[in-house]
Image: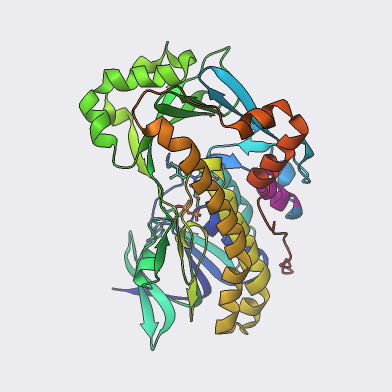
């Protein structure tokens, strides 16, 4: 038998956008339900970076001290290694935020933290193992949605449904929103290798002839992202595991004594990368934010923070009206109006980097890589490193928490 629920706001997806929006709406006293299709947050394909802008939001919510008690490492500068030479390109020490670093923390710890902190709000509920399957629509207005749970089908009626279900969003598809494909010529091979004493301490991009590897420090192991051209997985498989391991070591020599931890291609996951955005983010009763509204590539590691910023803007604009029951259809488009510019700027940065940097690396021509002049300039001129740090760490038009906490 189908169960029924009625809430003011139903959020689809418990990623960074959905968990932050759920927290903010619960804090504002809005009757909110977050649905997450998985049973937990322990998935490996998510980024691990919590940037200064998100740490600032934590500070504004009074959560920062507790948040930084979670195991994490602090990344104070960004470096790229090209053909064995290291170039420092961003320095967070002068970014105008409380924290002058990126906190590198497994995303499941970040999401669990938001879940635990949200428990104190009586109007906020999270249902996991619950997957939205379709929207309930009457005369062009979204009235709620249908979902499957471990206990059977569920129908949820809501004043507002917010799609925070990521780059393969079911919500955006069900709403038939038009998607503008900005284009990403890469896919990523994702695997882990152990960490050893004496290893470099930072997240590092390693660029070499026809290869690019990013190593992310997850305290006791390296999360590695090896970039290939889109659809290039067949070629990697055809060349075999040994050739792949050699390519990894070519890109980052310090991994040579542990690359054999990769026993088969089962240890290497393919992650498909996309950059796109919706032309419309909302319709009556429905809004999309985060990757559901604008899929981000891993370049710059900024998607999580953009998703969090969308959530803050959404709560700032809608929370009081949702709570009072005075939300109007035209309020929803204000989120797109506010967040489109920052999204376009960051996507433009991702496209510029991928178009300038990736073709020579991914051409397979084994050419010596030319170091871009801008990288040399940044490395030689430390005060200039503040600007890339600002774009990556804070972005454009940073949001601040303005929605009020309801008396509990
Ligand atoms: C390989 C790769 C590496 C990346 N690395 C980084 C990085 O280091 N730093 C960074 O900032 N960004 C990174 N990004 C980008 C980043 O992952 C996204 O921009 C960010 O996760 C978007 O957050 P979100 O909450 O909008 O969506 P997501 O994080 O995708 O969350 C969506 C959630 O919705 C759930 N869901 C989906 N469908 C349904 C449904 N029908 N019903 C219920 N729940 C559903 C999913 O299980 C998921 O939990 C990376 C992206 C890729 C592809």
Using the image, determine if residue 209 lies above or below residue 350: above
The residue shown at (41%, 17%) is 249
Q: Quadrant of the N terminus?
A: bottom left
Q: Position of residue 208 (x, y in %)?
A: 46, 23
Q: Which residues are magenta?
A: 52-59
Q: Residue visible at 64% across and 58% down?
A: 120
Q: Residue furthest left?
A: 238
Magenta stretch contains residue 54? yes
Q: Overall secondary structure of the magenta stretch? A: helix
Q: Count the marks: how many?
A: 0
229 or 316, nearer to the observer: 229
Apparent side of residue 333 relative to residue 152 in the rendered image (left or right)? right
Where's residue 105, x and y in %? 58, 37
Q: Position of residue 100 (x, y in %)?
A: 74, 38
Left or right of 80? Residue 193 is left
Q: Using the rendered view, name the quadrant where residue 322 is placed.
A: bottom right
| Horizontal arrangement in the rendering, residue 291 relative to residue 101 (left or right) | left
């Amino acid at each position: 038998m189908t169960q029924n629920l009625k809430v003011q706001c139903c959020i689809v997806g418990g990623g960074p956008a959905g968990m932050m929006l759920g927290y903010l709406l619960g804090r504002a006293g809005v009757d909110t339900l977050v649905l997450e299709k998985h049973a937990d947050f322990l998935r490996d394909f998510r980024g691990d970076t919590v940037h200064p802008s998100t740490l600032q939001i934590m500070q504004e919510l009074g959560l920062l001290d507790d948040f930084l008690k979670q195991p994490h490492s602090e990344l104070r500068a960004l470096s790229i290694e090209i053909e064995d030479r290291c170039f420092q390109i961003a320095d967070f020490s002068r970014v105008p935020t409380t924290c002058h670093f990126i906190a590198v923390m497994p995303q499941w710890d970040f999401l669990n933290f938001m879940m635990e902190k949200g428990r104190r709000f009586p109007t906020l509920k999270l249902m996991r193992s619950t997957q939205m399957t379709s929207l309930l629509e009457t005369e062009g207005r979204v009235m709620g949605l249908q979902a499957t749970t471990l206990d059977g089908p569920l129908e949820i009626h809501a004043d507002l449904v917010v799609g925070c279900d990521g780059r393969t969003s079911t919500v955006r598809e069900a709403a038939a929103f038009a998607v503008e494909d900005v284009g990403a010529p890469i896919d990523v091979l994702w695997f882990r290798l152990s960490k050893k004493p004496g290893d470099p301490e930072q997240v590092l991009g390693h660029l070499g002839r026809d290869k690019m590897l990013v190593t992310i420090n997850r305290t006791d192991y390296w999360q590695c992202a090896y970039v290939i051209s889109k659809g290039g997985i067949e070629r990697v498989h055809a060349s075999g595991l040994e050739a792949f391991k050699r390519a990894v070591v070519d890109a980052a020599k310090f991994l040579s004594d542990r690359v054999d931890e990769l026993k088969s291609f089962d240890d290497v996951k393919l992650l498909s990368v996309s950059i796109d955005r919706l032309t419309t983010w909302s319709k009556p009763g429905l809004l999309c934010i985060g990757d559901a509204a604008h899929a981000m590539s891993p370049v710059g590691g900024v998607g999580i923070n953009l998703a969090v910023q969308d959530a803050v803007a959404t709560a700032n604009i809608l929370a009081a009206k949702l709570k009072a029951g005075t939300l109007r259809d035209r309020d929803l488009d204000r989120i797109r109006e506010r967040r489109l510019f920052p999204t376009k700027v960051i996507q433009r940065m991702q496209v510029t980097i991928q178009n300038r940097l990736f073709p020579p690396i991914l051409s397979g021509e084994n050419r010596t890589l030319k170091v871009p002049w801008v990288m040399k300039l940044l490395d030689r001129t430390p005060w200039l490193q503040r600007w890339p740090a600002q774009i990556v760490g804070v972005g454009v038009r940073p949001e601040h928490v303005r929605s009020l906490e309801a008396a509990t």
